[in-house]
Amino acid sequence: NTRTEVLGPAPALLAKVRGRYRRQILLKSPTRRELNRFLSSFRMEFRPPAVVRMTIDVDPVDML
């Protein structure tokens, strides 16, 4: 049972770059271990369409 909170998706600050729309999802978790467990499960189960590019950034310097 995870306590990771999912916020979003929401438009990124730069919502459209080079004709591509961008969204961001913020994950909040009480511990890094729980967050890593959530992300590991997510990566194994989520299969986006081929036209979707996804980047995961843990502890981003900024949300730009």
Image (spheres, rainbow, N blue to C red):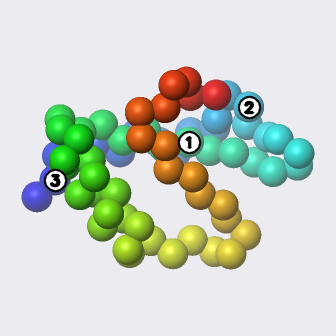
Callout 3: few (<14), some (14-19), or many (20+) C-alpha neighbours within 10 Å? few
Under circle 1, the secondary element is strand
> Is 52 above or below relative to 26?
below
Going by the image, does 14 lie left or right of 64?
Answer: right
Q: Which residue does the numbered mark 2 point to in the structure image? A: 14
Under circle 2, the secondary element is strand
Q: Position of residue 52 (x, y in %)?
A: 67, 64
Going by the image, does 59 lie left or right of 35?
Answer: right
Which residue extends farthest top? 62
Q: Could you say which quadrant of the image residue 24 lies in?
A: top right
Q: Position of residue 62 (x, y in %)?
A: 55, 24
Q: Which residue appears at 38% of the width and 74% of the height?
A: 44
Residue at mark 1 to residue at mark 2: CA–CA distance: 10 Å
Q: Earlier in the sequence, mark 2 or mark 3?
A: 3
The amino acid type of the residue labelled 1 equals Gln
Q: Could you say which quadrant of the image residue 39 lies in?
A: bottom left
Callout 1: few (<14), some (14-19), or many (20+) C-alpha neighbours within 10 Å? some
The foreground one among 2 and 11 is: 2
The amino acid type of the residue labelled 2 equals Leu
Numbered mark located on residue 2 in the image: 3
Residue at mark 2 to residue at mark 3: CA–CA distance: 31 Å
Q: Which residue appears at 51% of the width and 75% of the height?
A: 47
Residue at mark 3 to residue at mark 1: CA–CA distance: 21 Å
The amino acid type of the residue labelled 3 equals Thr
